[in-house]
Amino acid sequence: DEELDAMFPQEGYKILDPPSTYVPIRTPARKLLATPTPLGTPLYSIPEENRGQQFDVPKELPGGLPMMKPEDYQYFGALLNEEDEEELSPDEQKERKIMKLLLKVKNGTPPQRKTALRQLTDKAREFGAGPLFNRILPLLMQPTLEDQERHLLVKVIDRVLYKLDELVRPYVHKILVVIEPLLIDEDYYARVEGREIISNLSKAAGLATMIAAMRPDIDNIDEYVRNTTARAFSVVASALGIPALLPFLKAVCQSKKSWQARHTGIKIVQQIAILIGCAVLPHLRSLVEIIEHGLNDENQKVRTITALSLAALAEASAPYGIESFDSVLKPLWKGIRSHRGKVLAAFLKAIGFIIPLMDAVYASYYTKEVMVVLIREFQSPDEEMKKIVLKVVKQCVSTEGVESDYIRSDILPEFFRNFWVRRMALDRRNYRQLVETTVEIANKVGVADIVGRIVEDLKDESEPYRRMVMETIEKVVANLGASDIDARLEELLIDGILYAFQEQTSDDANVMLNGFGAVVNALGQRVKPYLPQICGTIKWRLNNKSAKVRQQAADLISRIAVVMKQCQEEQLMGHLGVVLYEYLGEEYPEVLGSILGALKAIVNVIGMTKMTPPIKDLLPRLAPILKNRHEKVQENCIDLVGRIADRGAEFVPAREWMRICFELLEMLKAHKKGIRRATVNTFGYIAKAIGPQDVLATLLNNLKVQERQNRVCTTVAIAIVAETCSPFTVLPALMNEYRVPELNVQNGVLKSLSFLFEYIGEMGKDYIYAVTPLLEDALMDRDLVHRQTAASAVKHMALGVAGLGCEDALVHLMNYVWPNIFETSPHVINAVMEAIEGMRVALGPAVVLNYCLQGLFHPARKVREVYWKIYNSLYIGAQDALVASYPVLENEGNNVYRFSGCTILSIIKGHGTRSSRFAPLKVKVAYLQNLNQVDSLAYFLLMELGAVRIWVLGCHGFVTVKFDDLQYLVNSFFSFGVLLVMKPS
C-alpha cells in the first residue's frame, strides 16, 4: 500500500475501502503470460466415447442376432442395451422387434434372412408404416451400404409395400427421396430395383398421392432433382397406365410459371418412351400433341429436350406411327435451317428417327433435303454433334428409297474425308458409331466401294486407326461376302491384313484375329496362293518371346483351318499339327489353351487317319494336361479328348483310355458348366469305345465322394454311359450298388436312374418292371432326399412309357408317390407334384382325378389345399378329359344336378317386344314335354325380338340373359341341342 500511495499524487484522489463481498482472483502467472484471445478458447477435454466408431471387440448380441458392423451401431445400437423387454412400452417393443428383424435381413445368414423377411412381410400392417420406414429409410441412405445389402433392403420395402397398401400414403415423399437416386445409378440392377419399388409404390398409394408428392420437385432449381423426378414419373406412368397421367402432363408441359416445369414435363414424355418402348403406340398422337409446342419455346433447353423427346418417341414406335408426327415435321424442318449447336443436334436426331418411319418416296425426298445440313455439319468440331450426325446418316441411308448412286456421288466423298481420320479412333463412342454407319453404307453401295477406300489405311502408323479399319472390313465382309472384291483389291487386302496383324502391340487382339478370320473365310479358295505366306507368319510368331503373340498365332490357326481344308492344303495342316504338338510343353496356360484349340480345329477338318502326329502319340501327351486347373486349358483339352474318343477311339489302347477316365473324374470338379458337360459326354464316348464295364466301375466308386457337384456329374455320366451302351449293360451294376448302406451312394443311384430314364425315353418300357422294387423301397425311405429323387425318377419313367402299356407298374408306383403329397419341403413337394403330372400323362387324368376326389372336400383346410392344388394342375393339363370322369350326383331337394330329356330355356318375364330388347330377361330351365311346339315357338322368338346376342350371367335355377343378336342365339343353342321355348306370361 505504501508503494502505491507514493506513486499516486497526494491531491485529487481518495482511497476507497473494497466491498465486503470482494474476493480477489488468484490467477497463476503462466495464464497471465498467455496470448489473449477474443473469445476464451476452450481447453482440451477427453471426448465422450462415440459408439458409432467402436474399436474394441464387438459385443455378443443376445438372442442369436447376427454380428453388427461398426457402421451399424448408430442404427442398431439400442439392441446392445440389455433392457428387460417386459418393462418397455408397446411402441418401444415394436421398434426393437423391427430393428432385430432388419438386422437379420441385413447381416444374417440366408435362413435367418428368409424368416426375418417373412415376418416383416406378414406383420407389416401390425408394425405400421411409420415405425417400419423410419427404420428402413435411414439404412438405405447409409453411405457405406454394400450392393448386396441395398438389394436386401429394397426387397424388404418391396414386400412391405404390398402388405401396407394405402397405409403407405403419408410416407410416399420420404420413400421417393431415398429411392429416386437409384433410377440414375450406374449399376443396371440398382436402376431396375428403383423402378420396381416406385412401380409398386404407385400401385399402393395411387396416382393422386404420387402426383401430390412429386409435384413440388417438377420445377426445382436443381437439375439433378428434376431429372430423377422425370424418371420416377415415367415409372408411375408405366405402372398406372399413360392415359391416367396425360391430363397432368398436358398441364405441366404448358406451364407458364417456369421453364423448368415445362422442361421436366417434356422430359417425362422422353423417359416414358425410353422405358416402355413400343407400348407408347396407342398414346403416340396425344403425347406428340402435348409436347409439340416446345419446339418453338423461347427457352433453348426446352426446345432441345422437346426434340430429344420426339426422337425417343419415334425410336420407340418404329416402324409405325408416322401419321402422329405430321404436326411436328414443319417446325422441325424450320428448326434445322435456323438453329445451330446443341439445339440443331437435337433437331437432327429427331428427324433422323422420324425418317425411317416414312414411306420410301417421302423418305428419299426428306433424306436429300436433310443431307445438305448433315454434310455441312460433317465438319463440326463438336463431339456430340459428330455422334448424332453419324447416327442420322446411318438411319437415312438404311431407309428404302435412298439409291446407292446418290450415296456414292453425294455422301461418300465428304463422309470419308471428314470422318475417316485418326482422331475418330481415339474416342470409343465415336469409333463404334463410325463403324456402324460405314457398315450400313456398305449394305447399300457394296463391299468394293467401302473396302477400296480404306484398305490402304490397314498400313497406317496409328494402331487404334488400323484397328478401326480392320473391324469395319471384318463386319462388311462378314455381312456381304467377298465376291465384289477384284484381284487387285484382294492382294491389297491380304497384304494390309498381314501387316496390321504383325504390327499390333496392344492387348485388344480380338479385333485383328476376327478380321483376319472373316476375310480369309470370305475369300475361301482364293486365299490358296497366300497360305504359305500366312502359315510362315504363324510359325514365326509361334516362336515369339511374347506370350500374347504366341497365343494369337495359335488362335489364328483355329480360325483358318476350315479354309485350308477347302484349299486342299492338308500337307501344310499336317505340318502345322506337328509344330503345335511340339509346343504342348507351353508354360503359359492362356497360350496352351489356344494351342489345344488349334490342334482341335486341325483334327476336326483333317480327320483321325491323316492327322500328324498320329492320334496314338497325341493322346498320351494330352493325359497329363488334363490335370491343368486353368479353365481355358481344361475346356479345349477335354473337347479334343472327347473328339478323339468319339471318332478315333480305336487308335488308342484301352489301358490309355482308362488312364484318361481317372483324369476325367477330377474334371468333374470344374467350376465351369461347359467343362463338366464335355467331361460327362466324353465318358459316354469312352464307354462306347472300350465297353461300359471298366468305365462304370470307376464312376460307381466316385459316388462315394463327399462333394455334391462331383456326385451329380457322376450320375449324369452313368446315365450317358447307359444311353450309349444300352441300359441293360449298366442297370444290374447300378441296382447292385443301391445295396451299399450309404446315403450318398443310394441317392447317386436314384439320381442316375432319374437321368437314365430321362435320356432313354420309351426304351424305358423294357426296364420299368426291373427297377420298380428299388423305387418302391426309395419312396418309403425315411430320408427326404431319397423320396425326392425317386419321385423325379418316377416322373421321367412315366413320361417315357406313356401309351406303351405299362400302366400296372405305374399305378403301383403311384400308390407309393401319393402319400408324399403332404410334404412341406419345397424341393420334395415339387418332385412329388411333377411325378403326379407325369402320371397324368401316362395313366390319364381320370385315374389321378379318382385319387384326388377323396380329399377335395376334406374337413381339414391343409388337406383340402393340397388336393385342390393337385386338382388345379390336373384341370390345367387335361380340362377336356376330366368331364367324362366327374362323379354322378343324385338330385337333392332344390339342388338339381341332372336333367332328363332335352333342356329348354323358357322365358317367363319381359318377353317379346323391341322396347325390352336390351333388358335382362329371367329365364328358367324347364323340360320339353311336347317336341312338336319347338319350331313355331323358336320362330316366334326370332320374329318378335329381332337380332339378338345372348350372355348367360348366372345359373342357379334362374338365369339372367341379355339379348343382342337373335340369329346367333338360335343357331348356337340349336347347335348344342338346347331348344328355346317361349311361354306366354
Image (cartoon, rainbow, N blue to C red):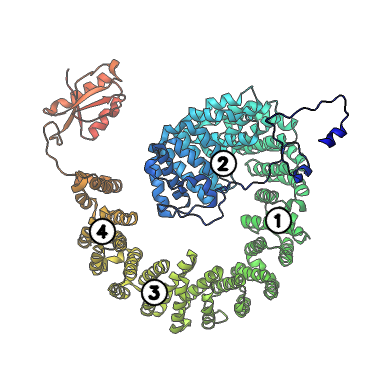
What residue would you read off at disc 4? 803
What residue would you read off at disc 2? 183
- The residue lying at 24 percent from left, 66 percent from top is 777
Q: Quadrant of the N terminus?
A: top right
Q: Amino acid at mark 4?
A: Gly
Badge 1 marks a residue whose secondary structure is helix
What residue would you read off at disc 1? 468
Q: Position of residue 599 (x, y in %)?
A: 57, 74
- The residue lying at 23 percent from left, 61 percent from top is 813
CB contact under 8 Å: marks 1 and 3: no
Q: Nearer the viewer, mark 4 or mark 1?
A: 1
Q: Is residue 508 left or right of residue 245?
A: right
* Crowd rating for badge 1 (residues with CA inside 10 Å; few <14, some 14–19, many 20+): many
CA separation, marks 3 and 2? 50 Å
CA separation, marks 4 and 1? 61 Å
Q: Is residue 392 left or right of residue 980?
A: right
* Crowd rating for badge 2 (residues with CA inside 10 Å; few <14, some 14–19, many 20+): many
* Crowd rating for badge 3 (residues with CA inside 10 Å; few <14, some 14–19, many 20+): many
- The mark nearer the N terminus, 4 or 3, is 3
Along the line of sight, the residue nearer the viewer: 692 or 75: 75
Q: Amino acid at mark 2?
A: Leu
What residue would you read off at disc 3? 702
CA separation, marks 2 and 4? 55 Å
Badge 2 marks a residue whose secondary structure is helix
Q: Position of residue 962 (x, y in %)?
A: 29, 24
Q: Quadrant of the C terminus?
A: top left
Q: Position of residue 573 (x, y in %)?
A: 61, 75
CA separation, marks 1 and 3? 52 Å
- The mark nearer the N terminus, 3 or 2, is 2
In the rendered image, the residue lying farthest to the front is 2
